[in-house]
Amino acid sequence: MTEVLRAEHLAKSFGAVTALTDINLRLEQGEVLGLIGDNGAGKSTLIKILCGFHQPDSGRILLNGEEATFKSVEHARGLGIDTVYQDLALINELSVYHNMFLGRERVRWPLLSNRAMRKLAKQHLDDMGVNISSVDVEVAKLSGGQRQAIAVARSVYSDAKILLLDEPLAAMGAKEGALILDLVRELKDRGEVSVIIIAHNYAQVLEVCDRVNLLQHGEITFDKAAGETSLTELTDLVVAEYRAARTRGTPPAGA
Amino acid sequence: MTEVLRAEHLAKSFGAVTALTDINLRLEQGEVLGLIGDNGAGKSTLIKILCGFHQPDSGRILLNGEEATFKSVEHARGLGIDTVYQDLALINELSVYHNMFLGRERVRWPLLSNRAMRKLAKQHLDDMGVNISSVDVEVAKLSGGQRQAIAVARSVYSDAKILLLDEPLAAMGAKEGALILDLVRELKDRGEVSVIIIAHNYAQVLEVCDRVNLLQHGEITFDKAAGETSLTELTDLVVAEYRAARTRGTPPAGA
Amino acid sequence: MDGAVGRTEAEKTPPKGTAPGAPRALGRAADAFLRRREATILVVAIALLVYFQWSRSAFLSHDNLVNISQGTAPYAIVAVGEVLLLVSGEIDLSAGMIFTLSPFLMHYFIDYYGMYPIIAIVVALLAGAAIGLVNGAVTVLLKVPSFVTTLGTLFLVQGITLTTSHAYPAEIPPAAQGLAGWFGHADWSELIWCLAIVAFFHIVLIRTRWGLHTVAVGGNLLGASEAGIKVARIKIGNFMVTGGLAAFAGILEAFRTSTIDPSSGGTGAMFTAVSAAVIGGTALAGGSGTVIGALLGALVLAELQNGFNLIGISANPFNIILGAAILVSMILNVHLARLRRAGRS
Amino acid sequence: MDGAVGRTEAEKTPPKGTAPGAPRALGRAADAFLRRREATILVVAIALLVYFQWSRSAFLSHDNLVNISQGTAPYAIVAVGEVLLLVSGEIDLSAGMIFTLSPFLMHYFIDYYGMYPIIAIVVALLAGAAIGLVNGAVTVLLKVPSFVTTLGTLFLVQGITLTTSHAYPAEIPPAAQGLAGWFGHADWSELIWCLAIVAFFHIVLIRTRWGLHTVAVGGNLLGASEAGIKVARIKIGNFMVTGGLAAFAGILEAFRTSTIDPSSGGTGAMFTAVSAAVIGGTALAGGSGTVIGALLGALVLAELQNGFNLIGISANPFNIILGAAILVSMILNVHLARLRRAGRS
Amino acid sequence: SSDNKKDAGTAAKGGVGAFPATPKWKFVFVNHVTTNPFFTPTQYGARDACALLGCDFQWTGSQDSVVPQMINAFNSAISAKADGIAVAVVDKTAFGAPVDKALDAGIPVVSYNADGAKGDPGTNRLAYIGQDLYTSGYQLGQRIASLMQGGDAVGFIATPGSLNIQPRIDGAKDAIKASGKPINFTSVASGAELPKELSTIDAYAQGHKNVKGMFAVDAGSTENVGKVVAKYGLKSKGVAAGGFDLNPATLTGIKAGNLDFTIDQQPYLQGFLPVLYLYLYKLSGGLTAPSETNTGLLFVTKDNVDPYLATKTRFEGSSTQQQLLNRTGPIAHK
Ligand SMILES: Nc1ncnc2c1ncn2[C@@H]1O[C@H](COP(=O)(O)OP(=O)(O)OP(=O)(O)O)[C@@H](O)[C@H]1O
Ligand SMILES: Nc1ncnc2c1ncn2[C@@H]1O[C@H](COP(=O)(O)OP(=O)(O)OP(=O)(O)O)[C@@H](O)[C@H]1O
Ligand SMILES: [Mg+2]
Ligand SMILES: [Mg+2]
């Protein structure tokens, strides 16, 4: 296997808040990497650095073995990196299909190919088992899960080589979530796309990932193949951290 | 057990989209009711009717056995109903503690008791295991899970008699989610508060709920005590629906 | 939340319950019309027309229609630029001053630098766009809010106009007289330019990537940049378009009125243009607006101005009636919009 | 995103690395100062002061300070109202016309209806608030965008002023002359009122429930109403405050200039007030703004106006210099703000 | 129009005075600053003439001297088939075509208050009633030159570039230059709003302690020059001051000696006479052609200010009341 993405010693602060101190991470070709960690651990910040939205304070990124500086999101996207953001990055005022192709519109110059986009959008949503009355409605009017499905579809159906998915299943129903995991697995099976996926549902993580990384205190503190770890180990890891940090008696229930 | 909330024949449409057709639902004193359903099934719409944000097109609501029309969110809140919205209803420009007490500010007339609110906010966040650098930062700067924790804290620590929680755990980490479930359980044990909770993670639902309702096609189609159902049954329910509705071959993976 | 730019609503599937027996095609056309965001303001414009024609029969005379078209066109042209800017979340207060300056520039270029008239016009338009570029660069790159940036350039450009013209009107250069008919002097020439510009930018806003990105930037700046949209380029571009259009409107008005006057345009013209945009349904907060709506907004304002003048209202009470008419017609507009939405079930 | 109203930033814990040995308390005070959003615009105001004093020594003379204070105060008072409105996501274009009308109302009440002067003043202020109520009700209840509503009332109120006054200035009623000193005629009286009003509404915006809800409504309208905030009441209330403050500013200026003039106030005053608010850091898009910033914004504008006049810039080039100065000082302001934020690590 | 219905009672029925019955003719005044107090007496003049003659008038144009807006109003008047138009020709080229169009349509047009540029009326109007702005400014300049021996003088202008006042300042400049006196005259913009004007003039006075003359070309600035002169006691330092128009505060400034003079441009006649001329033109079938009328100007000084102050009159716009003003004593003359 070849390494498509590697981060070395990445650090990032926001004013007084240090989000990342020393991140070292690698992503192999065709691999699905699960990234877990507490709320506020810095997972989203890491993703936003890897996709060119934030610039790291220090450290470097290697893309296919070569050092790369992502000047902007478009730049990184041009290099084959696409992202589902936790905040979804949807434009409420635009229709479902325009959101789904935002930044990668189908164009028959000089006009947008609305018909093509509308058709594709419908098809993608069907494939994801998402039921939306019409792809013409503004996303402001959609339910939480429908909105997330659009954001996910935007990236998953792009021809990106590296997908960064920040909690893509948070608002998805059981059925829709399962279908998206199927999709990710399909991508993996084809072996062309490498994925980093953030999720808090460890069962889902183990189900779809090849490897799991835990982000704690601004560093990757745990890195194991999915087959070598278990739901209990992951849960314990987090609980242990929590027990050590706090002395309050309530035992966290196994998720 | 006495019934604190009952909905009869509620219907609601948005223009051409019918979200709810005929909802019948009851909530007992001190009970935790789990509400599940596909994306776009109408769960959030139902919650928004029960909290006074939307007005139903038809049907009626009984509060403690008496018919009640909630003119507005303040009105319903005055009657003891508090809500965590799926979109969180946070004000990005305000600090953590102001968001946490929004609409229920502590006041030493004519001024806000910022000190009291700040202290309480810190304490609540600690109790929820949420780590935020300072309660003075604007919520715009927080991570997804941190934001959700604030929205949840706002309601859970209110003195509401009925709590409506719309996917309160979607962005929460394993640890933080477990702690919130603990909190809900505590409330239940005290028996004073009744809760409706929406979640897509059926394991969590079964863990904390007394009863589970499934919302499908604008109606409640399934209503069983948690003890009488199981993860498999719930998953199968959803998958069956999905199989019936679509003929595509991909089998949905068990969540 | 009645957002977007008419895009989504205009293209919905027809409702289920169309009156049976009614001529289908017509019903569907009426329906498609009513779905457009601009429909209600068009209804208001037509209602005003009917009212004024009823109260004073000269309203629809050829000459008066020319008057109305001339009272609409230049502001509609500036409003097109302001719509693009407002949709992308910015505003240009200096547009009216660019409007004032540009015919002077044309005059200087022709009379002092001996340029060919048509080239002088093009260069004056480019100068307008260049002022827009400055507005955009200061706003986007130096992060000064556009209200403040363009407040600065408003004064700056006005000062340049006054100083270079010695605050005195100039005549249309004789060399350019041949172009007068094409650029505003002929009866319908302003209207034709205006309609062409409105049509073009309507397509740009509704059907091109540029328009889509303009809405995206104004609707959710953070989201748009997360989605990899070139926010700076879109905003600066829209400032440039506004500058160029304002310059063009100024030149049209100079030819129409046969004078280059330091008091034409100004903040008044900018204010009228922004008002037309907002009346036409563009949100000040960004993310939503329509070019055709702005044209109709400018038309409504011109109708009011012209109609009450025709009826013979004098200056002092004029504003009472104008203000009341704006309030009444805009309440009507909003009410119609609500009916329109409610009817679509 | 440098949002809120100074609340959150002002109250952060001090940074770790304070220069050792430096006088602690002073350092901390300077630090607390620099954390405030208003800090940078204050620096700009002081820089201008230093520049003008250096270039023309009369700038800091007693008389000229009075002059500057009088050029600041009335606009700052209107700006306070506009800040509240802008923060809650609305705007009032009619404020300047209320400013023009209110001293006429006072005059009518006293001279035609024989009211006691002080009561006439109070009633005039209430009338201003009543116009604000109309603005608010039409905007919030009838859902007409506030830009359009207040555009309508702008003309309506102006028309009322012109018609009732026959567009002719009036004298301060002799009966009210005794109050002149209190209400604007005495050297510092405008400034004192202004500071009192600014202080009061600063507290209202920063420290009361009303202010918190104002920010919430402007920051996230949907979220605020989901959270059970009485959106309509907040917005209408802020319109009323703006109307009342504009009326008060108009009366102060009438007493100061010893005349009641239909050309005082108007859209110019409104524009100055909104500019002061925006220069002072209030976002046009809502959710963020500071009352003290608006005062400083008005001060900066007054300093520029006064200083260049003191220097004796003549009419035509004046605006070039004013515009350039606005651009330069606002770029400086933004740059300082960035330094301020970067320094806080 | 709505605001002069009351006054214009005896319309077509019998005819007024000895005149035969006429239709209720409607004349349109196209003005450049419709709501400026200067023109309040002009409107009274027009209204009184209409009441006298049983006709009607409309007062319209632009509020802030925007030429395209005036042209729109002018064209509307043609569309509305006005019976006559009076226009302030503040731009020497812009009104040529519209006036021709009106004349072609058989609508008589006169100009008032402003008549193109010096030596070039710019339109084919039938006659001009008033004194042009440049000339009045020129006379201001001559007055300044007679009051001052030399030194710095300033002329305040509310809004440079505005057509109702810019020519005045240009005229003043030219006259001062022509006088050959060592007067260093600069123009300063004072702002469109009255309070701002006061602040500006005050600031200027402080920044220029050695100024020897302060003048203004608009009503608001003139009144405020008086106030600033009073505030700093500049009269005792030999500063000359004066300006235009008859604002109440200007007149008290003259009386108190803070202003040396103000210029009364007889605005009442600029409304009264156009109506009279247009009426007669219509009545006579075009035989009594309107005649050029110089309404002149009057320097109001301490010597002749009293009657202005004693009574508020319609002739200056300070009162709406119709009244008989009895004057006594000899009439001042050279
Ligand atoms: N723009 C910003 N400005 C200031 N602080 C920020 C900003 N973005 C993130 N942070 C802070 O950085 C830390 C890491 O945030 P991040 O969003 O990366 O967490 P996360 O691991 O994604 O958490 P979650 O699971 O809740 O999404 C948090 O403490 C957050 O408050
Ligand atoms: N304000 C609105 N305008 C128009 N349609 C709406 C509106 N709110 C909700 N809908 C539609 O109503 C349906 C139900 O939405 P709702 O948000 O209740 O779903 P949900 O069950 O909460 O879904 P999720 O699990 O994704 O949150 C959806 O099809 C949605 O598009
Ligand atoms: Mg995150
Ligand atoms: Mg939902």
Image (cartoon, coloured by chain):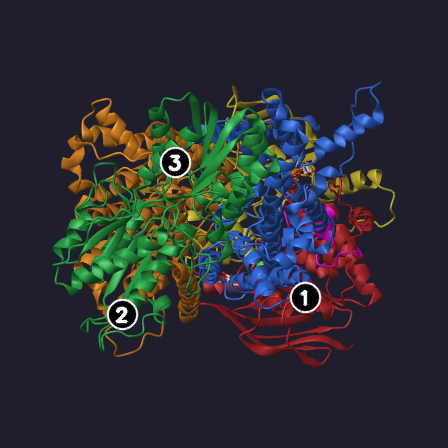
Chain colours: A yellow, B red, C orange, D blue, E green
Q: Badge 2, how many Cα within 10 Å: few under 14, some, many 20+?
A: many
Q: Residue at x 38, y 47 (%)?
A: E64
Residue C243: percent from left, percent from top: 36, 36
**Quarter of the figure with residue C212:** top left
Which quadrant is the N terminus of chain E positioned in?
A: bottom left
Q: Position of residue B239 (x, y in %)?
A: 54, 61
Say which of B233 and A200 sits in front. Answer: A200
Q: Which residue is mark 3?
A: E140
Query: Considering the numbered disc 3 on the image, is that residue within a helix, a strand or a loop?
Result: helix
Chain containing the residue with disc 2? E
Considering only vertical position in the picture, is B193 above or below A122? below
Residue D271 seen in this snapshot = no
In space, the residues marked 3 and 2 are separated at their CA atoms by 38 Å
Disc 1 from disc 3: Cα separation: 69 Å
D16 above or below D197? above
Q: Are marks 3 and 2 in contact (CB under 8 Å)?
A: no
Q: Chain of mark 1?
A: B
Residue marked by disc 2: E54
Q: Is residue B238 left or right of residue A113?
A: right
Q: Which residues are magenta?
A: B83-108
- Residue B74 is tagged as 1
Q: Quarter of the image containing the C terminus of chain E?
A: top left
Closer to the N terminus: mark 3 or mark 2? Answer: 2
B95 inside magenta stretch: yes
